[in-house]
Image (cartoon, rainbow, N blue to C red):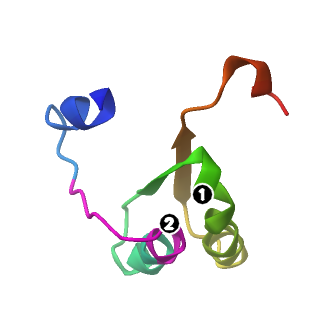
Amino acid sequence: MPIYDAMLSYPIHHVLVRHEQGGAHMADDMRALPGKLELAMGQVPRCDEFSNGHCTAMMDSVPVVFVTGQVAAHLIGR
């Protein structure tokens, strides 16, 4: 996965979780670290699992970026 190869060039702390929903909530809970932007990555078939963590982060005004990939070209924008 090219994104993991690219992360080696940056000071990124990677935490592998077993479920996207847990990763989304973990990114939201890292708000205790001031001045940090959290990122959660997941696969498209499971990206609906981000919704709870995304809503929680939004309601708490926590800056979290959610990234998904592997979208078929004909599905972009839908």
State whether residue 69 is above or below residue 77: below
Q: Quadrant of the N terminus?
A: top left
Secondary structure, mark 1, is helix
Say whether marks 1 and 2 touch (CB < 8 Å): yes
Depth check: 52 or 29 in front? Answer: 52
Res 47 quadrant in image: bottom right
Left or right side of 78 for 42: left
Residue 56 spot, x, y in % from top left:
66, 78
- Quick one: label 2, few (<14), some, or many (20+) residues within 10 Å? many
Looking at the rendered structure, which numbered label has been put on residue 20? Answer: 2
Circle 1: residue type = Arg
The residue at the point 61 percent across, 46 percent down is 44
Q: Which residue is mark 1?
A: 46
Circle 2: residue type = Glu
Res 2 quadrant in image: top left
Residue 9 spot, x, y in % from top left:
15, 31
Depth check: 77 or 65 in front? Answer: 77
- Quick one: label 1, few (<14), some, or many (20+) residues within 10 Å? few
Extent of the magenta region: 13-25
Q: Would residue 22 be counted in the magenta stretch?
A: yes
